[in-house]
Amino acid sequence: MKNISEKTAFYATLSMGALLVFIGLRFLFNPLAAEAGFGINVPVNGNFSFHYIKGIRDLFTGIAILGILWTGERRALGVLMLAGAIVPVMDFCLVLHNPAYTVDKLIPHLVAIVMALALGGYYLAFTTKKTSHAL
């Protein structure tokens, strides 16, 4: 049986990946509602390019996290999570520098930063390295 930290990391990663898929799909199919939840206001005038870029980025990231979690490649997942932490950091900065930001819009981005760093660090620190037979 897996220990509690492995289960916690697994379900936290599963939740994070699923949430990113949801957020990505929301930006693609309901961009204005997704924008309001993100914490910035982008004048669109019928052009949802920013929303689609954000949507496909989050959808890809969520699918990548879920795919790597499903294949059991925990060290690769750790690298992805640590490298991917730059995304919520930038999102946090974008919201923070929006003149109309509110603290409640910063919290989800801050939580994502902490989760990505903690989970990435966990997977790299506590997953055994597989030996490679590549030349």
Image (cartoon, rainbow, N blue to C red):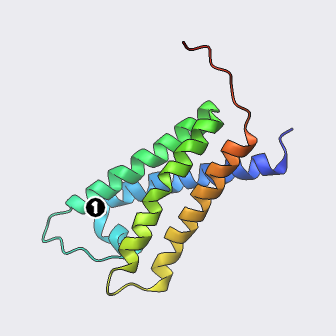
89, 1: nearer the viewer:
89
- The secondary structure type at the circle numbered 1 is helix
**In the picture provided, is 98 more to the left or to the right than 47?**
right
Report the residue that reaches farthest toward the front: 135
**In the picture provided, is 35 more to the left or to the right than 65?**
left
Residue 33 pos. (x, y %): 34, 71
Q: Residue at x 34, y 60 (%)?
A: 27
For disc 1, the marked residue is 51
Residue 101 pos. (x, y %): 38, 84
Examine the rendered structure and indicate whether residue 48 appears above or below residue 69. below
Q: Residue at x 28, y 77 (%)?
A: 41
Q: Quadrant of the C terminus?
A: top right
Residue 61 pos. (x, y %): 45, 47
Q: Is residue 135 visible?
A: yes
14, 68: nearer the viewer:
68
Q: Residue at x 63, y 19 (%)?
A: 132
**Given the image, on which type of amino acid does mark 1 rest?**
His
